[in-house]
Image (cartoon, grey):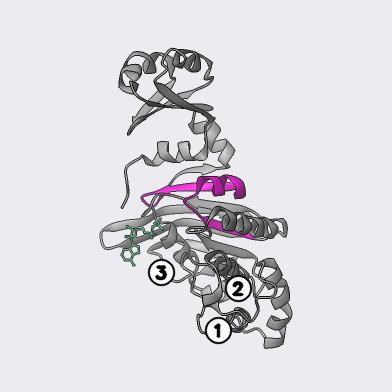
Amino acid sequence: MLKVQGLCKRYGDTEVVRSLDLDVRRGECFGLLGPNGAGKTTTLRLLLGLIEPDCGSIEIDGIAVPQHAREARMKVGVVPQMDNLDPDFSVCENLLAYGRYFGMEKSAIAARVPDLLEFAGLAGKADALIAQLSGGMKRRLTLARALVHDPDILFLDEPTTGLDPQARHLIWQGLRRLIADGKTIVLTTHFMDEAERLTDRLAILDHGRIVAEGSSRALIESHIEPVVVEVFGEGLADWTRHHAASLCRRFETVGETLFCYLDNADTVIDALKHAPTLRYLHRPSSLEDVFLKLTGRDLRD
Ligand code: ADP
């Protein structure tokens, strides 16, 4: 559904996207992850034909972008990072106006509106003004709006950033429905749990390059020990000095926490029983551990 080969983009001296290859299958949910500045939004803008690449090729369902970007965009639904609903229009009018961009007849759009509102959990809100909607409602409307012309593929740029947990779950529910309907989704996110839940495969980008790609489970299995014990509390430095190297397969101290990576946590937990001032969190390793191992813990902005 989406094929990208050798894509690159530079701004001034900075190579923002470097020789990127992507192959997203029809019906797949594909995640693009990466720290701030990794090049995710630039990649999405290139895929939409909004900016010109310096090299490489993009095909959406066999249509070359940017050469035939207008034609390709008919197949694409977009949820941008910032909601850009028209505040002067009602919920229904926003859907109608958006459908008109795609050359749809007003009657054809109107016929889709009830389903789109139901999908967005906004049934009964057709005449509400945008200012009357909560952040979660606006996001859901933006998602419904992206579906007006029944696109095959959706590009979602951080669809749940800024939402509370309840609102995020509603968006996830909507996205799972779209995946079940066979839509292809390309999603950027900073939420590792979101990527783990929704994506079939994902790529981790850093400095414009893919540093790892695969299913969340495969990435965890290939990059990280299966178990983590996070240790914190009074006396951590001493305990780390005496025990970490011998008990942990791999460890690092970040701030006031020791991350001890292991195949099995039994021995470490036994040892911690003799250190009553320390507390610990024992958990399976996660995509976030992979992400931090590959992209580092330094702040990017
Ligand atoms: P991400 O979405 O992963 O946070 P972006 O694609 O927004 O990353 O940005 C990648 C890099 O490209 C950043 O260093 C950013 O400052 C730079 N960049 C993005 N757009 C422009 C632009 N129009 N002009 C110059 N630099 C840009």
Work out whether 251 lies above or below 77: above
Kindly indicate the quadrant of the structure image that contains residue 100.
bottom right
* Relative side of 244 to 27, left or right: left
* Of the pair 174 and 23, the residue shown nearer to us: 174
**Mark 3 sits on what residue?**
52
Q: Secondary structure at mark 3?
A: loop
Residue depicted at x 26% and y 63%: 12
Q: What's drawn in magenta, residue-wise? A: 184-209
Work out whether 158 lies above or below 250: below
Which of pointers 3 and 1 lies earlier in the amino acid sequence? 3
For the residues carrying marks 2 and 3, which lies nearer the camera in this image?
2
Residue depicted at x 59% and y 55%: 166
* Relative side of 176 to 4, left or right: right
| Residue 142 is one of the magenta-drawn residues | no
Percent across and percent down for residue 202 are 54, 47
Q: Residue furthest bottom?
A: 106
Which of pointers 2 and 3 lies earlier in the amino acid sequence? 3
**Mark 2 sits on what residue?**
145
Q: Secondary structure at mark 2?
A: helix
Which amino acid, mark 1? Phe
Which amino acid, mark 2? Arg
Which of pointers 2 and 1 lies earlier in the amino acid sequence? 1
**Mark 1 sits on what residue?**
89
